[in-house]
Amino acid sequence: MKKIFVFAFLVIGFYANAQSKEYTTQKEKKLSVKSPFEKIWDGELPAEIVYKDNEIIAFVPLRRQTPVHYLIVPKKRIPTISDLKDEDLHLIGKMYKVARDLAKKYGIADTGYRLSMNTNEDAGQSVFHIHLHLLGGMKTGPMVDQTFIDPRSKKDDK
């Protein structure tokens, strides 16, 4: 009986943490074609480009979420951070360097800014080509809605 319970727990846990079928289908469809970022890189889609070298491009997204909002994208298509290979790690460092430099250039380095990278369904990733959001120019508030209560914490912990 104990073995059945453990097996059921593992199977339910696996499916509870898996991506939805709809999301997986959309992801596969999007991965089968050029990403919008590759199209921007290749000049097939317009964008306000603020930085470009042989490995990284940065531009204003279609829907800015703050007064200063740039997407920093490697030329190499890596669908998610989970797909990152050890040989690609320099790209992550370079993306952060570009973010630092853009924050200085656009006057938000001292007041503060947020760097964000979404991975898969629960984080809301919709373009499967890693990209770093540089957000600033206003107070951004909490990253999540602060409603999660850690069951391990004491009620009087704050």
Image: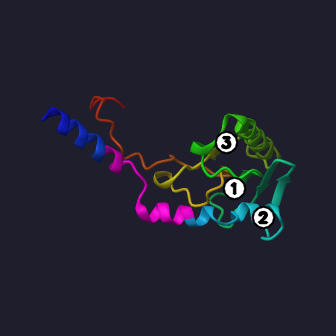
Q: Are marks 3 and 1 in contact (CB under 8 Å)?
A: no
Color theme of the render: rainbow
Q: Earlier in the sequence, mark 3 or mark 1?
A: 1
Q: Earlier in the sequence, mark 3 or mark 2?
A: 2
Disc 3 secondary structure class: loop
- Front residue of this view, candidates 143 and 117: 117
Q: SS class of the residue under badge 1?
A: strand
Q: Residue at x 29, y 40 (%)?
A: 10
Q: Residue at x 66, y 62 (%)?
A: 64
Picture quadrant of residue 83:
top right
Across and down, in percent, residue 52 comes to 85, 52
* Residue at horizontal 64 percent and vertical 44 percent from the top: 115
> Mark 2 is on which residue type?
Ile
Residue 100, quarter of picture: top right
- Magenta segment includes 20: yes
Left or right position of 35 against 44 = left
Real-space Cα separation, disc 1 to disc 2, in angstroms:
17 Å
Report, in whole angstroms, how far the alpha carbon at label 3 lies from the one at label 2.
28 Å
Mark 1 highlights which residue?
69
What residue does disc 3 label?
Answer: 112
Residue 17 % position (x, y):
38, 48
Magenta region includes residue 129: no
Picture quarter containing residue 62? bottom right
Q: What amino acid is at disc 3? A: Gly
Residue 40 shows which numbered tag? Answer: 2
Q: Residues within 10 Å of mark 1 (few under 14, many from 20)?
A: many
Q: Range of the magenta residues? A: 13-28
